[in-house]
Image (cartoon, grey):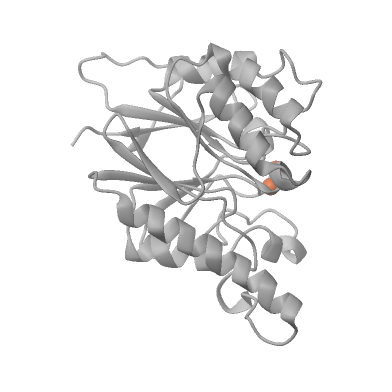
């Protein structure tokens, strides 16, 4: 696996599977025309496009329709997870179906898909903190409910990972499974950016790479405890880190 310049176009016969990934599009009703060029370039640069949540800004079906129109320029398979913003209006299913019906997006919520021989397991994930700072299910019912949400999301990820049978496997999340890719954010909000509970299934069912968003001011890359690369592809982070390149990340997966 290696990172490539999204502008390079290797020989079709020789080239590995190329994945383009970006999260945190935060599409609004006024975004028409603003994302089309980015998606066209991603479609040109890769064999599949992953969208790592916060697809819409307020979780409105109208925003999802705008995004679906913007995605009409993409000619490769699109696989996504929702983010916390996609839940804001309480109709995540409407957001999901707008993207599925109008742009053919496969939105994963504890499921797995195979694209060109690469398996992709996806779940939104949740927050709660990392390592020794993780919130425990103890005390008030509200705390237990909060922690249970993180446990449920980790179980969704685990059940998706368990379905993968391909040699190359990818995990797709919105929240971070490791602290490494949220570093750069204010330390006070680390517990709201992800959860180590998401890392546990990734150790039991190792993958080739992990993509997430949500931490707009985090770090581009980190590794799980078992050495799997983790890519934070939040669009604001990519825009700041690579202002001269389109705001998506391309990772190559050799044919095996
Ligand atoms: Fe976001
Ligand atoms: Fe988010």
Q: Is residue 247 left or right of residue 18?
A: right
- Quarter of the rendering containing residue 39: top right
* Residue in the picture at 40% in, 17% down: 8
Q: Is residue 173 above or below residue 62?
A: below
Q: Give me the residue at 21% from left, 20% from top.
A: 14
Asked whether the viewer can see residue 37, the reply is yes
Q: Position of residue 62 (x, y in %)?
A: 75, 26
32 left or right of 233?
right
Question: In this orientation, which residue lies closer to the viewer: 71 or 99?
Answer: 99
In the image, residue 204 above or below residue 24: below
The answer to which quarter of the image holds residue 256 is top left
Percent across and percent down for residue 219 are 59, 49
Closer to us: 25 or 151: 151
Q: Is residue 115 left or right of residue 150?
A: left
Q: Quadrant of the N terminus?
A: top left
Percent across and percent down for residue 246 are: 58, 22
Q: Is residue 217 visible to us here? A: no
Q: Is residue 236 above or below residue 144?
A: above
Residue drawn at (66%, 86%) of the image: 138
The residue drawn where x is 67% and y is 42% is 92
């Amino acid at each position: 696996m290696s990172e490539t310049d999204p502008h390079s176009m290797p020989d079709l016969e020789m080239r590995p599977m190329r994945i383009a990934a970006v999260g945190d599009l935060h599409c609004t009703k006024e975004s028409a025309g603003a994302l089309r060029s980015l998606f066209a370039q991603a479609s040109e640069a890769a064999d599949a496009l992953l969208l790592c949540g916060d697809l819409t800004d307020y979780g409105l079906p109208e925003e999802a329709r705008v995004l679906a129109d913007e995605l009409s320029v993409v000619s490769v398979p699109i696989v996504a997870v929702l983010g916390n913003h996609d839940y804001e209006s309480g109709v995540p299913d409407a957001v999901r179906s707008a993207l599925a019906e109008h742009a053919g997006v496969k939105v994963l919520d504890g499921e797995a898909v195979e694209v060109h021989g690469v398996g992709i397991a996806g779940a939104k994930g949740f927050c709660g903190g990392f390592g020794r700072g993780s919130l425990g299910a103890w005390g008030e019912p509200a705390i237990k409910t909060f922690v249970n949400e993180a446990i449920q999301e980790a179980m969704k990820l685990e059940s998706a990972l368990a379905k993968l049978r391909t040699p190359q496997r990818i995990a797709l999340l919105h929240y971070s499974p490791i602290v490494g890719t949220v570093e750069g954010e204010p330390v006070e909000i680390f517990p709201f950016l992800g959860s180590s509970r998401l890392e546990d299934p990734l150790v039991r069912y190792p993958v080739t790479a992990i993509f997430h968003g949500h931490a707009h001011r985090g770090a581009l890359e980190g590794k799980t405890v078992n050495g799997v690369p983790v890519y934070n592809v939040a669009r604001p982070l990519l825009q700041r880190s690579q202002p001269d390149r389109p705001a998506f990340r391309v990772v190559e997966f050799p044919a095996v």
